[in-house]
Image (tube, rainbow, N blue to C red):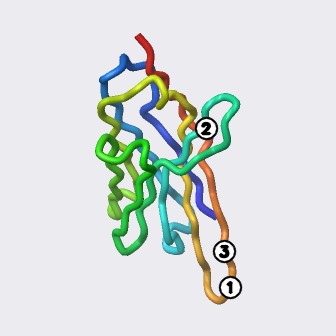
Amino acid sequence: QVQLVESGGGLVQPGGSLNLSCAASGKIVNIVTMAWYRQAPGNERELVARISHDGRIKYADSVQGRFTISRDRAKNTVDLEMNSLKPEDTAVYYCHTYSAEWPDHEYNDWGQGTQVTVSS
């Protein structure tokens, strides 16, 4: 399995910026995708951004143009740069990895979550 530790959450005013970071350890060689999800109170967990091992990136429509996901293979980290934050971005943000191990073992791992609050 993969162990994930997030950092960087906090309180920010609307229009501000925050950077989240997630450090991966364990069976990192099997990681296929790394992603950030978020869950607001009363809502389902949703994908924010995902980056694949080949560099393909997907963003939720709601964050396109404001958030940037990046992966540092040397440091085994995935970062989320969040700009122009809105109150509706308030949520617990979770780091996620999807891994595949030959021949047919697939698994998902989650971090513990970090709170992001956008409020004046």
Residue in view at x 30 percent, y 23 percent: 15
| Residue that carries the numbered disc 1 in the rendered image | 104
* Disc number placed over residue 112 in the picture, else none: none
Q: Residues under labels 2 and 3: Cα distance?
A: 24 Å
| Residue that carries the numbered disc 3 in the rendered image | 106
Q: Residues under labels 3 and 1: Cα distance?
A: 6 Å
Instruction: Locate residue 120: give its quadrant.
Output: top left
Do callouts 3 and 1 mark residues in contact (Cβ within 8 Å)?
Answer: yes
Residue in view at x 50 percent, y 41 percent: 6
- Tell me which amino acid carries mark 1: Asp
Q: Is residue 27 above or below residue 92?
A: below
The location of residue 55, given as percent across then percent down, is 34, 69
Tell me: 42 left or right of 79: right
The location of residue 102, given as percent across then percent down, is 62, 86
- Tell me which amino acid carries mark 3: Glu
The location of residue 85, given as percent across then percent down, is 36, 29
Q: What secondary structure is found at the residue carrying circle 1?
A: loop
Callout 3: few (<14), some (14-19), or many (20+) C-alpha neighbours within 10 Å?
some
Q: Residue furthest front?
A: 61
Q: Is residue 86 above or below residue 51?
A: above
Q: Is residue 31 above or below residue 10?
A: below
Residue in view at x 61 percent, y 32 percent: 40
Q: Residues under labels 2 and 1: Cα distance?
A: 30 Å
Q: What secondary structure is found at the residue carrying circle 3?
A: strand
* Disc number placed over residue 39 in the picture, else none: 2
Residue in view at x 63 percent, y 58 percent: 109
Q: What secondary structure is found at the residue carrying circle 2?
A: strand
Tell me: 94 left or right of 15: right
Front: mark 2 or 1: 2
